[in-house]
Image: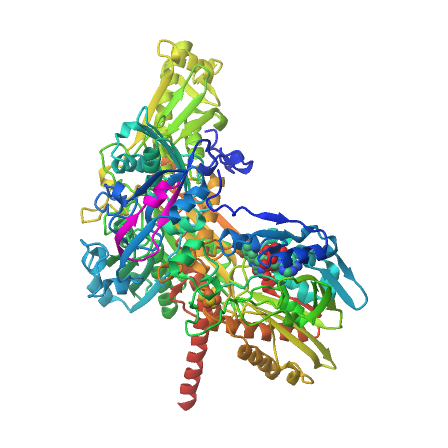
């Protein structure tokens, strides 16, 4: 007996090299890369997309490698989230990244889900992530081929929210993303991988694939705090990653990455103005305000957007406060614990 | 006593191994060979006249074997004989988004899905109402023609002198509490397998039902079949919590498809469809007013409840009656006025859910009592103690109270939680709260009154010495078959392994009303004991004949029948059976249980609802941490005591108590259905958030045994009683932690944060006002 909603019949292409993978995509841009499948297959079952073929990249050995050198950590796109969450070197060097990985979905997803899949996660919206019956009954929206956005009917863009947890950590840690394309590879700062447009949030050409991330190992303190309704198995209402350096009790470097509030993960602007100051109440308030001003949550979840904004601000204050406390070098916030 | 004597840990459920090893077969795992796939087309609109429903293109699709619409459904159905206003497939009109409109049976899922897409539906849309007050507005269009004001039922009950009660109270307070609609979210999605044999005209139905008898009856009704041609079997069922205590549209549709196709049809609903089928706790607004004396005595209670019941009647009348009648029975209340309004809306129909009708009103009552105690400077435990009942007694609305262990429940949780030393001394952001609750052990008057006993159990014993109990009671994971096995084994002095239980197959087991209102332990347990006693009498007589002694001299324990006067004289259980079978052959005895008329409630209209043979009682203390920056509430620990009369199986009782706490925690913290213009936006386990193991605190579950005079071995129900006290205890703990009184459920981070912001604003204003003074 088949399940009530069988996956559509599909073809699987199984390249063993990066070049073959992008060649297959260049052949037909509607093909989708399949990594852990924890996002893609769920979306396909709901009829959100029906690619003619899946390019299963899990046979490309190079993408599964993780290497630590003196000043950088290179993490292949296929490295499973569970490995990042459990690796003591990652926890030690890039605390924000470890905490972010540990906060994703539930243990089963983390064993299957990959770094590349997490960065390339589809944006989410309560009007979009529903069954085919639901979307048809409710009427299509911009993201599903319709004429109007149910969240902001006056606008012309889609506000579906980017909800990946790794990206804000990588943004805070100033990581680069390595992208392969026909004829070579390019590198891009993590924040620049994304657009503020829910329908097409990735700045990747059809024949490009994420191959690795490179995280510099600078002497920063970092952490990630994520708020969600339940402690596991839940996308972020908002997630904040911070990497900072404190020299002589003063802030000498600060990067803040935020997820869950916009169609892309945000690098918060204007943090330079806070450098050179002590991390005291007024600085925390200023940091909180920076975040509250820049995030743009819309009604794409069942939770009020103003609440997601308040949360992003509150998490920023809390995380920066904890990171700046003399005894902290790394933070895994209370809401990011978990198996 | 074998199982029930001494220090008892309890026994694992007799079907537990089948479940954990995966051997257990649930409806979707049954033999589907040769089965067609059934699928349902659902309404895209909330409220509309059906102008045209054209299935011809779908019918012509190769592979489609049967196709049905409302035209094929002539007979309405519904769980209450007085309120059958639903058809398996909509006729003439649709009333909520997701309502079944047509159904197909096809050779495979792809063909069935394609067929649905070929059905053409043309409608004339009508105004739709998603909130009770919209539906009740003077100019609202009627959802059902015979229900003006879209009011399904109003209830007005008044007992005692309410006005005088308030007049003598030192403190009178009134508050409005809003509780979101929740869903059972049982882990097994709905499924059914129906097989019609055209040569014999017989139908065999297997389904996830909690009420196989109702299903049997309703199949006969809607398919216009002779009852005797129908067999209903309940396979393993993955939870119910009330989701399956009425017959559901997909069950009837599956059977109708099977008959039309002249074969076997398998229907499996998606999680989304399972949520849409709904039948759970309605969105409820409660206006609660209490009068309290400075001495802590309750003087009067006035309560108005509005339930948004969804598009069809279902159990609605019972739910709105329960909400009022179970204001009684927990405390000594001198005067109570209740006004209930059950309202239709263009949403999936609500129904019964664990704690049926009582949970939201209990929340409002306990919450207000806690706030008023605070105002009067009284300890929450003390206030409860001043208002205890004394069994045996009858409440104002004629509910019989025969055993009452609430006082001990209070003592136990107060001591275990360290309430006296810790309450008020926790750091800011941490708090303790407490509340009480109760629930019925089975409705004393069944919905379908036939004059039959409330429960019948057959016990068969055969030449091999095996004992088999036959019960119609549906074990849906709550452990009822294990309870029957213990009751029979205990009465016959046998180890539990020697008793086999065959349950819920209408071809072999006696009729049973089903798994609802926590009736099985009390009613079926008593019937099982009755049957086993009758068998014991027969076996004792046979043993006495064999031993040539007087039956009064024979005792049966530990698998032997022994002479009391001559200890060396005895025969084994099996030999006694052999002796009894001489001249008789295989023995089958019947046991029954009937609730006496005096237990069946008052004479006032609706007075039977809430009546029961015994109430369970619970008290619990909840400890929380509240994050005032994010609004997150964490439950750190729960202490809960339940008076279940007597714990026939302490292991199972503990499991039920923990389950009740956990379910209460879900409703209190995060569970809620959410509709966007009538579209169920919550209909997945991602969006319908339930606590995970990481959200679950340690639960100290304590059992209090008040030994009910009528219960089986003194037992009462153990599953629903501890549910309703969680939410008010949590709300009280939040108030204790951060000084915020929440008037809404669930206490999601956004609602808590809003309340914190409001409190801060108030504090600022107060400070300003103070400065000016
Ligand atoms: C119940 C549930 C809860 C979840 N909770 C969270 C959560 O809390 N936080 C969170 O971040 N995620 C969550 N997820 C989403 C998902 O599990 C993770 O984001 C996971 O990291 C996705 O990785 P994957 O390898 O499974 O991706 P896949 O599903 O294989 O791919 C996702 C997308 O990325 C593309 N893709 C994959 N690899 C590459 C590549 N190398 N280059 C270019 N494109 C690529 C795919 O084509 C696809 O479009 C949840 C998912 C579920 C089902
Ligand atoms: S934000 Fe608007 S366009 Fe985008 S998915 Fe949601 S409803 Fe559709």
In the shown orientation, is residue B627 left or right of residue B269?
A: right
Specify how the rendered protein is coloured. Answer: rainbow
Q: Quadrant of the C terminus of chain B?
A: bottom left
Q: Residue at x 42, y 46 (%)?
A: B114
The residue range painted magenta reads B39-61
User: In the displayed image of the protein, which residue is found farthest to the right?
Assistant: A70
Percent coordinates x, y for residue A64 in the rendering? 72, 55
B658 versus B173 height, above or below: above
How many labels sit on residues? 0
Q: Quadrant of residue B499?
A: top left
Q: Which residue is at the front of the view, B296 or A289? A: A289
Percent coordinates x, y for residue B88 in the rendering? 30, 44
Res B29 seen here: yes
In the shown orientation, is residue A92 left or right of residue B231?
A: right
Q: Quadrant of residue B758?
A: bottom left
In the shown orientation, is residue B187 left or right of residue B104?
A: right
Residue B54 located within the stretch drawn in magenta = yes
Q: Quadrant of the N terminus of chain B?
A: top left
User: In the displayed image of the protein, which residue is found farthest to the bottom?
Assistant: B772
Percent coordinates x, y for residue B145 in the rendering? 19, 54
In the shown orientation, is residue B509 left or right of residue A320?
A: left
Res A116 seen here: no
Q: Residue at x 57, y 77 (%)?
A: A291
B686 versus B393 height, above or below: below
Q: Quadrant of residue B173?
A: bottom left
Q: Which residue is at the front of the view, A77 or B591? A: A77
The quadrant of the rendered image in which ligand 1 is seen is bottom right
Residue A119 located within the stretch drawn in magenta = no
């Amino acid at each position: 007996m088949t399940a009530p909603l069988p996956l559509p019949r599909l073809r699987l292409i199984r390249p063993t090299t990066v070049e073959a993978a992008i060649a297959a995509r260049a052949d037909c841009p509607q093909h989708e890369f399949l990594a852990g499948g924890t996002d893609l297959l769920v979306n396909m079952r709901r009829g959100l997309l029906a690619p003619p073929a899946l390019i299963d990249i899990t046979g490309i050995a190079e993408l599964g490698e993780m290497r630590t050198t003196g000043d950088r950590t290179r993490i292949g796109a296929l490295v499973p989230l569970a490995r990042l969450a459990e690796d003591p070197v990652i926890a030690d060097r890039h605390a924000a990244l470890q905490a972010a990985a540990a906060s994703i979905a539930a243990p089963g997803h983390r064993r299957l889900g990959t770094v590349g899949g997490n960065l390339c996660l589809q944006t989410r919206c309560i009007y979009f992530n529903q069954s085919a019956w639901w979307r048809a009954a409710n009427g299509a929206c911009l993201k599903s081929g319709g004429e109007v956005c149910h969240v902001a009917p006056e606008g012309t863009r889609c506000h579906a929210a980017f909800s990946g947890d790794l990206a804000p950590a990588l943004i805070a840690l100033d990581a680069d993303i390595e992208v392969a394309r026909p004829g070579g590879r390019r590198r891009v700062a993590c924040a620049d991988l994304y657009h503020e447009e829910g329908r097409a949030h990735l700045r990747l050409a059809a024949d490009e694939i994420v191959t690795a991330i490179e995280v510099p190992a600078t002497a920063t303190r970092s952490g990630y705090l994520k708020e969600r309704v339940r402690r596991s198995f839940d996308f972020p209402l908002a997630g904040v990653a911070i990497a900072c350096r404190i020299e002589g009790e003063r802030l000498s470097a600060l990067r803040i990455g935020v997820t869950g509030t916009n169609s892309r993960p945000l690098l918060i602007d204007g943090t330079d103005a806070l450098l050179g100051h002590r991390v005291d109440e007024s600085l925390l308030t200023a940091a909180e305000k920076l975040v509250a001003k820049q995030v743009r949550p819309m009604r794409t979840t069942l939770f009020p957007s103003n609440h997601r904004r308040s949360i992003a601000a509150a998490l920023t204050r809390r995380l920066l406060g904890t990171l700046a406390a003399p005894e902290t070098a790394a933070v895994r916030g209370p809401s990011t614990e978990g198996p | 006593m074998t199982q029930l004597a001494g220090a008892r840990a309890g026994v694992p459920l007799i079907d537990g191994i089948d479940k954990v090893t995966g051997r257990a077969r649930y409806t979707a795992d049954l033999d589907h060979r040769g089965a067609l796939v059934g699928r349902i087309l659902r309404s895209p609109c909330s409220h509309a006249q059906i102008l045209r429903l054209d299935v011809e293109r779908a019918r012509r699709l190769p592979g489609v074997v049967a196709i049905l619409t409302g035209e094929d459904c002539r007979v309405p159905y519904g769980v209450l004989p007085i309120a059958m206003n639903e058809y398996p497939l909509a006729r003439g009109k649709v009333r909520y988004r997701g309502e079944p409109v047509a159904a197909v049976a096809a050779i495979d899922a792809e063909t069935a899905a394609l067929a649905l897409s070929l059905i053409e539906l043309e409608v004339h849309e009508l105004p739709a109402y998603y909130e009770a007050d919209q539906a009740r507005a003077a100019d609202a269009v009627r959802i059902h023609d015979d229900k003006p004001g879209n009011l399904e039922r109003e209830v007005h009950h008044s007992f005692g002198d309410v006005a005088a009660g308030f007049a003598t109270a030192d403190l009178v307070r009134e508050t409005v509490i809003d509780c979101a609609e929740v869903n059972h979210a049982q882990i097994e999605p709905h499924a059914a397998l129906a097989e019609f044999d055209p040569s014999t005209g017989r139908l065999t139905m297997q389904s996830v039902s909690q009420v196989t008898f109702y299903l049997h009856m309703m199949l006969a009704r809607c398919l216009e079949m002779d009852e005797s041609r129908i067999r209903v079997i309940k396979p393993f069922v993955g939870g119910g919590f009330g989701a399956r205590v009425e017959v559901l549209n997909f069950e009837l549709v599956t059977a109708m498809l099977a008959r039309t196709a002249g074969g076997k049809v398998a229907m499996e609903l998606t999680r989304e469809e399972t949520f849409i089928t709904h039948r759970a706790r309605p969105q409820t607004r409660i206006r609660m007013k209490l009068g309290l004396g400075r001495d802590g005595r309750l003087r009067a209670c006035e309560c108005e409840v509005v339930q948004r019941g969804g598009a069809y009647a279902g159990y609605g009348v019972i739910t709105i009656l329960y909400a009022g009648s179970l204001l009684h029975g927990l405390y000594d209340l001198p005067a109570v006025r209740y006004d209930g309004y059950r309202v239709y809306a263009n949403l999936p129909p609500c129904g019964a859910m664990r704690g049926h009708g009582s949970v939201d009103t209990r929340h409002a009552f306990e919450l207000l009592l806690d706030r008023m105690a605070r105002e009067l400077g009284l300890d929450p435990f003390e206030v409860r103690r001043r208002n205890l009942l004394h069994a045996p007694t009858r409440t104002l609305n004629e509910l019989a109270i025969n055993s009452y262990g609430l006082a001990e429940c209070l003592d136990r949780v107060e001591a275990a939680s360290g309430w006296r030393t810790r309450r008020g001394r926790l750091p800011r952001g941490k708090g303790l709260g407490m509340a009480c609750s109760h629930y019925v052990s089975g409705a004393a008057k069944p919905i379908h009154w036939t004059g039959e006993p409330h429960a019948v159990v057959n016990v068969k014993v055969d030449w091999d010495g095996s004992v088999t109990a036959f019960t119609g009671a549906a074990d849906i994971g709550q452990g009822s078959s294990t309870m029957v096995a213990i009751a029979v084994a205990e009465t016959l002095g046998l180890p539990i392994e020697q008793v086999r239980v065959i349950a819920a197959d209408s071809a072999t087991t006696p009729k049973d009303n089903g798994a609802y209102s926590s009736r099985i332990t009390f009613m079926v347990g008593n019937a099982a004991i009755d049957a086993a006693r009758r068998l014991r009498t027969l076996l004792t007589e046979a043993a006495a004949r064999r031993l040539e002694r007087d039956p009064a001299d024979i005792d049966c324990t530990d698998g032997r029948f022994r002479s009391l006067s001559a200890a060396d004289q005895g025969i084994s259980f099996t030999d006694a059976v052999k002796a009894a079978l001489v001249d008789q052959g295989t023995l089958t005895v019947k046991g029954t249980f009937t609730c006496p008329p005096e237990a069946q409630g008052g004479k006032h209209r609706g007075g039977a609802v809430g009546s029961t043979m015994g109430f369970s009682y619970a008290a619990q203390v909840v400890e929380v941490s509240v994050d005032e920056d994010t609004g997150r509430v964490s439950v750190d620990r729960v202490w809960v005591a339940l008076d279940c009369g007597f714990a026939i199986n302490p292991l199972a009782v503990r499991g039920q108590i923990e389950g009740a706490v956990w379910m209460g925690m879900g409703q209190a913290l995060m569970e809620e259905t959410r509709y966007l213009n009538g579209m169920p936006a919550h209909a997945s386990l991602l969006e319908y958030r339930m606590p995970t193991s990481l959200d679950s605190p340690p639960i100290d579950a304590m059992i209090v045994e008040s030994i009910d005079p009528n219960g089986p071995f003194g037992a009462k129900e153990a599953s629903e009683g501890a549910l309703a006290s969680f939410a008010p205890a949590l709300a009280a703990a939040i108030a204790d932690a951060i000084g915020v009184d929440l008037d809404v459920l669930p206490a999601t981070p956004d609602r808590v944060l809003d309340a914190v912001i409001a409190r801060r604003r108030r504090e600022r204003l107060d400070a300003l006002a103070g400065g000016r003074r």
